[in-house]
Amino acid sequence: MRWAIPELEKILKFCDQNQSLAVFDLDSTLLDVTPRSIQIIKDFKNTASYKSLTDDDKNNYAQINYQHSDWGPSAPLKRASMSKEAHDMVFKFWWSKFFINDYLSYDIPYPGALDYVQKIFSTGSDITYLTARKKQNMLDGTLQSLLDLNFPINNKQTRCVLKEKDHNDHTYKLDWLKKEIPKYTKIFYFENEAKIINHVRRELPEVEIIFMDSIHSQEDSSPVGLPTLPCKFK
Ligand SMILES: [Mg+2]
C-alpha cells in the first residue's frame, strides 16, 4: 500500500485553497498495527500461561505467522493449529496488551502516510487524529507514538481525539464529525473500518470519505464508489 493516488493530489489542492479539516483514523489507516500484535504474541512466551501449554501447543505457537492482512490474532492462531485452550490464553494476553499504552511504539506508518499528512499540514488545513482508542488507557502512548513518528502535532492546527465514553465506535465518530461540519468548507475523513464508513456516509453525506482498504472487522461490507487507498499486501 502506498498513499499516492490522484484523488489525494486533488484533496491537497482543495485544502490549500479552502478552510478544510482532514480527519485521520490511526489504527490500520495511518498506522500498520501488525508489529504491535507480533510483539505482544512474542512476549506471551515470557508468561506463566506459555509455560503451562502442552508440548504440541508450544510447537504450534512457534509456527504462528502473523500477517499484515490479519485483523487480530484469531486467524494466525487458527492457522497455527493452536488448541482452543491455548488459543484462548494467547488471545487473552493479546487483548490485555493491545489496548494500552505499552506497545504503541511498535506501530509503523504505512508507506507514504506520514508524507501525506505532512503535506496536508503544510497547506494550513486543520488536522485531527480521530481514534477509538480509549483516552484513559492510551492517550500518553498515542501522543508519544505520533511525536516519535514525526506526525504533525501542535496545539493550533492539530487535535488528537480519543474515546472517553463507552460508545460504540461508529456512533462516537459520527457524533464528533457532526459537530465539526459547520466550522469548515469541507471535511476529508480517512478511515479503514467499513462499519464506521458506511454509517458516516449514510448520515453525513457532506463529509468526503477516503476508504483505506487495509483490513477491517468485516462487520459490514467494504464501501464501493469512494476514493480508495488500495492495499497491496492483500
Ligand atoms: Mg482503524
Image (spheres, grey):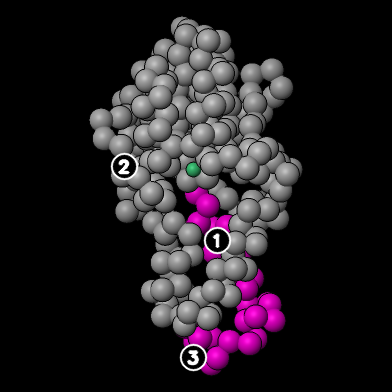
Q: State whether residue 86 is above or below residue 234.
A: below
Instruction: Name the secondary structure under disc 1.
Output: helix
Quadrant of the image containing the N terminus: top left
| Residue annotated with mark 1 | 37
- In the picture provided, is 52 more to the left or to the right than 198? right
Image point (47%, 18%), residue name:
187
| Residue annotated with mark 3 | 56
Tag 2: amino acid: Ser
Q: What's the magenta region? A: 31-60
Secondary structure mostly seen in the magenta stretch: helix
Crowd class of label 3 (few under 14; some 14 to 19; many from 20; radius 10 Å) = few
Note whether ligand 1 is within 8 Å of mark 3: no
Mark 1 or mark 3: whose residue is earlier in sequence: 1
Tag 3: amino acid: Asp
Crowd class of label 1 (few under 14; some 14 to 19; many from 20; radius 10 Å) = many
Pointer 2 with pointer 3, Cβ within 8 A: no
Rendered location of residue 229, percent (x, y): 35, 36
Rendered location of residue 32, percent (x, y): 50, 49
Could you say which is closer to the camera, residue 171 or residue 7? 171
Crowd class of label 2 (few under 14; some 14 to 19; many from 20; radius 10 Å) = some
| Residue annotated with mark 2 | 222
